[in-house]
Image (tube, helix red, strand yellow):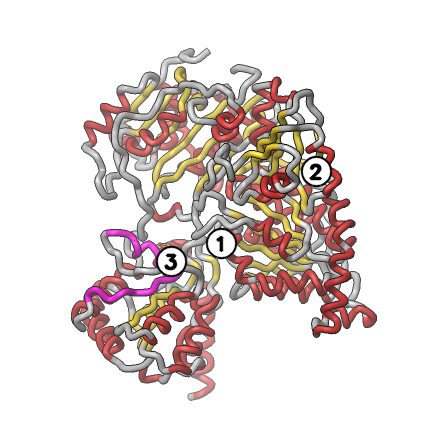
Amino acid sequence: MNATRIHGVVLCGVGGQGVLSLAQILQEALRRSGLHALQSEIHGMSQRGGSVHAQVCYADQPISSPLIDEGCADLLIALEPLEALRYVAMLRISGHLVVAEEPLPDMEGYPPLEDVHAALRAVTGAHLLDTESLARKLNHRQAGGMALLGMASRFLPVAEKIWRDVIAQRFEAKGPRVTEKNLEAFEAGRQMIPEGVEA
Amino acid sequence: MIQSTLALGVEAVGQAAFDAGIKGAFGYPGTPSTEGFEYVEALIQQDGKDRVAQWATNEKVAYDLALGMSYAGYRSLVTMKHVGLNVAMDAFANSALTGVQGGLVLLVADDPGMHSSQNEQDSRRLAEFAWLPCLEPSTVQEAYDFTRRAFDLSEALQVPVMVRIVTRLAHCRAPFLRQEALAPAGIGLTPKARVQDWVLIPSNARRRYVDLLAKQPRMRQEAATLNRLVSGTGRRGVVLAGLGRAYFGQLLIEHPELAALPRLEVAAYPLDPALERAFLDQVDDVLVFEEDYPVLEERLGLRERAQVRGRLDGAVPRTGELSPRILKDALGLATPDGKGAAGLDLPVRAPRFCDGCGHVDAYEALQEALRNVGAPEARVFGDIGCYTLAAQEPMAAIHAVVEMGASISMAVGAAFAGQTPSVAVIGDSTFAHSGLPALLTAAESKANVTVLVLDNRVVGMTGQQPSQALDQVERLVLGLGIPEIDLQVLTPLPKQHAANVTALEAALRHEGPSVVVFRRECIQSLRRGLLKDHDRAVREHHTCSAEVCS
Ligand code: SF4
């Protein structure tokens, strides 16, 4: 982490995919790591399938701005590949992108999926996740979001134990089985990025 | 002080109002103000004491509820979005003259950039218009602190106080510290000696207007305690308000050289002219960063003491919300290269109806019925709610959406101009909000209109809050003078399509006003089971009264 600047994560996807809930887990994990963290979200009509995005800013000193500037984000977590492309410009040159390959094409004029994937692969620091296969393998339809968070965790200054605690707390009300499933998806994602990519 | 959990900016306002000992919270849903009310509503429900949180039929009703509570000597909060204040404007402007007994705070959430609104009007102007103080927080902590402050100020000056926040702050989640929580404590009914202050007949109103103007210096003094002049070394300065303050504060950390700029930080209005003069004495060139209208920019520019730049001369974009990039560009700071945009054209992903939403079935029936009566091109007047989505291609089923309740009156106006058929589409909650007087006029004037009330039983768009017209729509329609024979209630389901089309055709062909209610609960409300208890209670009540009758 760089002490003098604000760090930023952008999260995006489609209404109903759980973007805001991921953002809240992320903010909580950063806070428990002793950092200052703000979350900013644009929602309102989110249950009706429009684009949704949130930002989480963090630093080791108090933050007043709820937004990070274009070209300044360190990490982009995208639950949908086309949505990811909308926010690539938010990333700094050294930034990373973790993105679900599986599209939600239910809209006018969705471009050919190969083009979308190719455009994503052309981004340096992009890590694509075959969320569909993973969901099948883990027998957990919603595994994608947590797995992406697991991948993202490699680039964030949060200890593994804190992640597990925050996730467990988040799903506590839904019972131990749901919690286990989500921790498993998180771990699977985390294993996909080798340790120590970002020191 | 107590460490609180995380909350949105708009929720921090709700928490502060609760901690300030309000007896009641009132509001009408509207993004981005809704969660503020919902937060305080949840606190009040947990508290279980003698407090009330009540959604109102519309913003004016909400405001008057708060004002009545104030008259009775208790603190109250009223919440709405910026355009909602237009609806409550009569109450707001006149409450400046009556003044308050218990403290009254108005939370109004502006929406620069129109994330979910039809305009980007600036509520600071409305506070100024009503001669009332306005506090403008820039962080979640300030949202809490300023709201607490606003209640004290309201009682000290005996006027309502506005807290203005914008979307980005309303929906920013951050931790904040609370102050000691007060229990609701009444200060007693407005005393007899002050009753005439509340009776705004001209003789009293003239006196009260003078009183209100006489409070202005105190308001400016109080506001000045939140405003700040920070001296610098150069002759170039900045004026910062709202998120302009927040973004600049962040830039200062990364660019310490900005501290050389003299700056005027504005957090409360009305502005003290002495402060303005002191600032303008230090600068020749000024950049103003404020959300929405160029309020401070115009005001300082008129003094002609420095070159004032901002939205009016294009140093800041004329419309839309501020962003860190806008500040950097205007200040001439370098911006990073970043990865740049993806090399692919990206079509917009427009919001759409939930799968299975009854509105879609209603619109499909309407479009077919219009074709069948030979009016496929008929213009349909829409209103505000989820059903506004039908204005988009490819459906394009409604052709005007202006403000809450406009559909019915506009259809009547167009019918008077000769349009046949003249159709209005309005939701149940919007109908209750401001469609009722319009339908009375339609009935009274016997205008040739067809009004569709799309009754999804909740306020769908803002998160399925309770609709004030729940189970009442037919009675309201009949009560407003629409004959029973001209009212039909249909179920918008694919399997009812043919029958619905036939019924609609009859309504469209009918000379004079007719009303068609399409009733099916919002899918999201159904999924969450929001009306389960209500419906069970109604059923049980029915059985019981039937037994009594038989
Ligand atoms: S929220 Fe309810 S009313 Fe709105 S589109 Fe979805 S189902 Fe329809």
Q: Which x, y percent locates residue A167?
A: 47, 32
Q: Which mark is residue B30?
A: 1
Label pair 1/2, CB-CB below 8 angstroms: no
Residue at figure coordinates x 37%, y 13% from the top left:
A194
Q: Which x, y percent locates residue B469?
A: 46, 69
Q: Earlier in the sequence, mark 1 or mark 2?
A: 1
Q: Which kind of residue does numbered mark 3 sit on?
A: Leu
Task: Check disc 3: other Cα within 10 Å, few if <14, some if 14-19, many if 20+.
Answer: some
Q: Is residue B359 left or right of residue B81?
A: left
Residue denoted by label 3: B526
State the residue lying farthest toward the bottom: B550
Task: Check disc 1: other Cα within 10 Å, few if <14, some if 14-19, many if 20+.
Answer: many
Q: Earlier in the sequence, mark 3 or mark 2?
A: 2
Q: Which kind of residue does numbered mark 1 sit on?
A: Gly
Viewer-proximal residue among B173 and B108: B108
Residue at disc 1, CB closer than 8 Å to ligand 1 = no
State which region is magenta: B376-393
Q: Which kind of residue does numbered mark 2 sit on?
A: Glu
